[in-house]
Image (tube, rainbow, N blue to C red):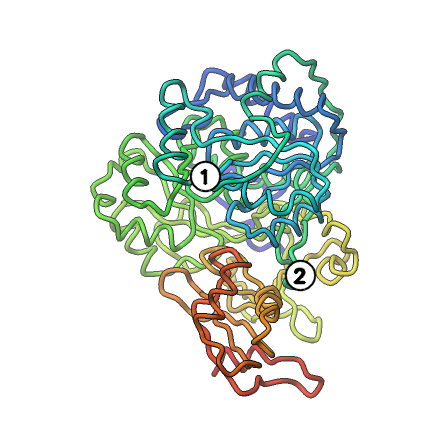
Amino acid sequence: MEKIWVAHYDNNIEAEINADVVPSLLNIFEASASKFASQVAFINMGHQLTFAKLDALSKQFAAYLQNSGLKKGDSVAIMMPNLLQYPVALFGILRAGLIVVNVNPLYTPRELEHQLKDAKVQAIVILENYAATLDKVLANTLIKNVLLTSIGDMLPAPKKWIVNFAVKHIKKMVPLHTLKETISFNEALTYGKKLPYTRPNIAGSDIAFLQYTGGTTGVSKGAMLSHRNMVANLEQVSGNLTVAVKQGDMVVTALPLYHIFALTSNCLTFIKLGSPNLLISDPRDMSGFIAELKKYPFAVITGVNTLFNGLLNTPGFAELDFSHFLFGFGGGMAVQKPVAEKWQEVTGKILIEGYGLTECSPVVSVNPLTLTEYKGSIGLPLPSTDVKLIDENDNEVALGESGELYVKGPQVMVGYLNREDETAEILSDGWLATGDIARMDEEGFLYIVDRKKDMILVSGFNVFPNEIEEVAAMHEGIMEAAAVGIPHETSGEVVKLFVVRKDPKLTIEDVISHCKALLTGYKVPKVVEFRDELPKTNVGKILRKELRDS
């Protein structure tokens, strides 16, 4: 497909980027740490971390890791919400030449065990609030080093002590666990200060992240994202941002940094730009979120549709000072027109939509920042990105017609860890089959029409039916189950589970309770319907489409 979209790029955006401008993320971090040393890099719970302090602490952590038996290419997991410890751990792991494995803190023991074993994780940095989950599966993993941290650990005294006491003893947010031979994250930093650090030789082909996703089926897979993949996507994204964003402009990071969207678009991109990240630890507390926004001259807010909608419907948001605000950036799920229009009415600035997926590091397309109103498009393909739309007969469709979106570019993953067959299903000759049905207009703007996959999208998180069905089948009272997504006004979609009972006494409450014990909250079915039988093909495959349409 001819790159007709290039003609509609904002001024000063080149059609191609140099994916090899630097060898690794280390180079980008080191350059920013030096250039912006005195500037603020992260803010959380009222405390600031400058680039210089982040540089020093992450180097100390890297030294600790290098001297604790880990070797280049080993995997280290991070399991925590948005706290100052996260970027220190993240850049420390990368600077030690290790691979970052981001873990959702809300995982159940079953989900956590799968990911830790699949990635062969050797060490984990974990918030003590989730240690009880790790405690249940640690013996089944390869982990030799558990680093525990508390919510207030990066705060100055006495605030640190007050916060940690309140979390543990007043709010009772730390379940009992029996983990032994752990070390505190702060102790590791102290040890690291006295240990030698050796800068590793990192090539662009080295893996930086194992970012877990459902892929094309329900089994969680590690998308191997190389340093070159990530450097390329940063070049592609930051080139678009610099049209409007200048050094020092603050980005609000409410989405979790363990999610690829916030990881790239907020953490890494704004480190590259030399701008501060305001970390929101609990965005579900909308009143607290708005109270934080009142304190700072924020310029950019990234999020999913449900987040923007939640802010708009929380008292106090409309009264915030938007004089420094530049734009909102939505991804992860479709931005709804009413939300985008209300956002612009309240803030005076546009809500820009983009599109990406874990396998693309993640950004594929974004709307120009010079748009003046909601367009309903996922934007123009990024520089150095090829796209094509393919019909059911593997033919490229004409402009304006719908087809499955295929993507090719330097941001496309290396593949799925240890899953060559499943990699080959969606990645061939550099082209990644996204599973999304799209169309392109005459200017090169892309529009998502539908999803080819059965994937369910809940508040920007992928939920794969196979996993839900497998968990449901573990219940002795369930004969068969099928999961589909149904529309929901706030989260985009929720999971609906169709169940054929083996036990006639089985209740809806029984099914939901069983799923809650084994699945992260957003994956748990919100609607359960009992059926005598499920529609199937002549070879016995359940027809989820018929269930969705019923």
Callout 1: SS: loop
Task: State whether residue 263 appears in this view.
Answer: no
Q: How many marks?
A: 2
Residue at x 32%, y 37% (from the top left corner): 325
257, 513: nearer the viewer: 513
Q: Is residue 239 left or right of residue 72?
A: left
Q: Quadrant of residue 292?
A: top left
What mark, if any, has residue 174 been given in the picture?
1
The residue carrying pointer 1 sits among few (fewer than 14), some (14 to 19) or many (20 or more) residues within 10 Å by Cα, namely: some
32, 382: nearer the viewer: 32
Q: Nearer the viewer, mark 1 or mark 2?
A: 1
Callout 2: SS: strand
What mark, if any, has residue 433 been given in the picture?
2
Q: Quadrant of residue 46?
A: top left
The amino acid beneath tag 2 is: Ala
**Disc 1 and disc 2 in contact, CB within 8 angstroms:** no
The amino acid beneath tag 1 is: Val
Mark 1 to mark 2 CA distance (whole Å): 42 Å
The residue carrying pointer 2 sits among few (fewer than 14), some (14 to 19) or many (20 or more) residues within 10 Å by Cα, namely: many
Expressed as whole percent of the image width and height from the top left, the position of residue 106 reads 51, 49
59, 378: nearer the viewer: 59
Of the 4 image quadrants, the one containing the N terminus is: bottom right
Expressed as whole percent of the image width and height from the top left, the position of residue 22 reads 68, 29
